């Protein structure tokens, strides 16, 4: 089993991002994705990720990840496909979203 989890995370550059982690069968991190297209309400508190890339897995091939509003912008999935992604995991509600 593989697991994709999301969290607000302060990276080494000091900025906060919506971050998705791909965890492998052993529970170790295979890769992380910093959301490239945060919603308008998130842009003040969270930065945009600058790279879309896939992560190699032993059984699934190359996996990519998208978070919430990334799916509205078709170029994000297209970039993953062009980078060789065989599968794209999509997380609709990142940690920073709160229902009111």
Image (tube, grey):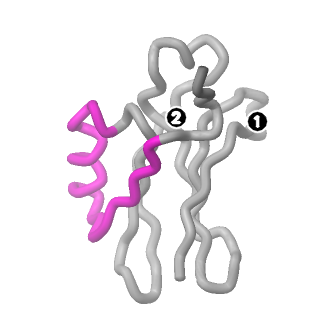
Mark 2: which secondary structure?
loop
Classify 10 Å Cα crowding around label 1: few (below 14), some (14-19), many (20 and above).
Answer: some
Residue at image position (55%, 62%) is 4
* Rendered-image quadrant of the C terminus: top right
Q: Are marks 1 and 2 in contact (CB under 8 Å)?
A: no
Q: Position of residue 15 (x, y in %)?
A: 71, 27
Residue at image position (59%, 70%) is 30
Mark 1: which secondary structure?
strand
Determine which quarter of the picture holds residue 76. top left
Number of numbered discs on residues: 2
Query: Which is nearer the eye, 73 or 51?
Result: 73
Q: Position of residue 53 (x, y in %)?
A: 41, 54
> Magenta residues, as a range?
71-92
| Left or right: 98, with 58 as reference point | right
| Left or right: 5, with 78 as reference point | right
Q: Which residue is mark 2?
A: 49
Q: Position of residue 92 (x, y in %)?
A: 44, 43
Q: Which residue is mark 1?
A: 10
Q: Is residue 4 above or below residue 19?
A: below
Residue at image position (59%, 30%) is 97
Q: Say which label, 1 or 2, has the lower sequence index.
A: 1
Query: Which is nearer the eye, 75 or 67?
Result: 67
């Amino acid at each position: 089993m593989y697991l994709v989890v999301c969290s607000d995370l302060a990276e080494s550059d000091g900025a906060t991002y919506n971050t998705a982690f791909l965890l492998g069968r052993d529970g170790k991190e295979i890769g992380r994705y910093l959301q490239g297209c945060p919603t308008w309400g998130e842009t003040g508190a969270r930065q945009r990720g600058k790279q879309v890339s896939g992560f190699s897995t032993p059984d699934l091939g190359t996996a990519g990840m998208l978070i919430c509003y990334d799916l509205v912008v078709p170029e994000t999935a297209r970039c993953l496909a062009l980078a060789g992604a065989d599968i794209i995991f999509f997380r609709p509600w990142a940690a920073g979203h709160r229902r009111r």
